[in-house]
């Protein structure tokens, strides 16, 4: 049986970009355009009405901005993945979005093919970020204090899980981890699922944040 299409909802106040994104998503097999809206004033009713799997959220919108929209989506539907779109690599905005539970963070100049990869990645449980944004996320957290010596790692992670968590912290995608470690994509997903369970987190952003705060890598 063919897997159901991934439903994507766009919030973007620039009409030209909104149209081009809509055309890109509408013409891509495996994706379904759930909606394309110029603001997120009605986000709390939009989500149950349009039932997106993934939301592409412009940060700078009139009225309710993208970060507030992100918070409302996560409060209403924690399982909906939200990828932030921005023109600028703004430290404060990146930090606010990460703390609010963003599942990914991309620059608007991201090429269409990479944007489509990012949607597939976030649907599979990843947290896509452009390299420049990933580096900024790392700078936002203080250097971790070396963990106290225990028989096991603080989260009881295996050596392989610690390796993979370290690569996530460095901004590697699932595909990059698989290539770097010489393992399959399914094996990477399996390890990351166990990491989430042991760290008691639900997204890669949360896992990276916790790893940096607690010095788990």
Image (cartoon, rainbow, N blue to C red):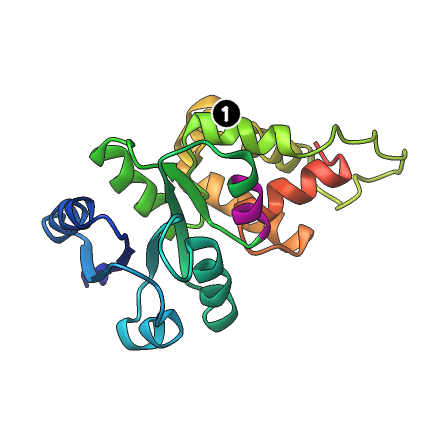
Q: Which residue is mark 1?
A: 181
Q: Is 124 left, or right, of 152 in this rendering? A: left
Residue 149 in which image quadrant: top right
Residue 204: where, in percent of width, then height?
53, 45
- The residue closer to the viewer here, 62 or 113, is 62
- The residue closer to the viewer here, 148 or 77, is 77
Q: Is 46 left, or right, of 215 in this rendering? A: left
At numbered mark 1, what does the secondary structure look like: helix, strand or loop? helix
| Quadrant in which the N terminus appears | bottom left
Q: Is residue 1 magenta?
A: no
Graded by Cα atoms within 10 Å as few (under 14), some (14 to 19) or many (20 or more), the crowding at tag 1 reads few
Q: Is 200 left, or right, of 150 in this rendering? A: left
Q: Is residue 78 visible?
A: no
Residue 109 in which image quadrant: top left
- Residue appearing at x 49%, y 34% in the figure: 90
Q: Residue furthest right?
A: 149
Q: Is residue 125 visible?
A: yes
Q: Is 175 left, or right, of 49 in this rendering? A: right
- Above or below, 151 relative to 76: above
Residue 8 in which image quadrant: bottom left
Q: Is the stretch drawn in magenta largely helix, strand or loop? A: helix
Magenta residues span 94-99
- Residue appearing at x 79%, y 39% in the figure: 153
Q: Is residue 98 magenta?
A: yes
- Residue appearing at x 42%, y 62% in the figure: 64
- Residue appearing at x 35%, y 72% in the figure: 42
Residue 110: where, in percent of width, then height?
29, 32
Residue 4: where, in percent of width, then height?
22, 63
């Amino acid at each position: 049986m063919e897997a159901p299409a991934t439903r994507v909802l766009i919030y973007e106040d620039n009409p030209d970009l909104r149209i081009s994104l809509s055309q890109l998503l509408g013409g891509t097999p495996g994706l379904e355009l759930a909606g394309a809206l110029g603001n997120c004033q009605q986000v709390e009713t939009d989500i149950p009405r349009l039932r997106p799997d993934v939301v592409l959220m412009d940060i700078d919108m009139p009225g309710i901005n993208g970060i507030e929209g992100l918070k409302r989506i996560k409060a209403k539907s924690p399982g909906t993945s939200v990828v932030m779109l921005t023109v600028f690599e703004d430290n404060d905005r990146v930090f606010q979005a990460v703390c609010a539970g963003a599942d990914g963070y991309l620059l608007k100049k991201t090429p269409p093919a990479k944007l489509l990869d990012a949607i597939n990645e976030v649907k599979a449980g990843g947290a896509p970020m452009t390299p420049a944004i990933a580096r900024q996320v790392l700078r936002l957290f203080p250097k971790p204090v070396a963990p106290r010596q225990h028989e096991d790692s603080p989260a009881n992670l295996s050596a392989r899980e610690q390796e993979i968590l370290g690569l996530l912290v460095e901004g590697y995608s699932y595909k990059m981890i698989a290539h770097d470690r010489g393992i399959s994509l399914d094996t990477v997903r399996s390890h990351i699922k166990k990491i989430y369970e042991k760290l008691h987190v639900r997204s890669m952003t949360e896992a990276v944040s916790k790893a940096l705060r607690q010095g788990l890598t």
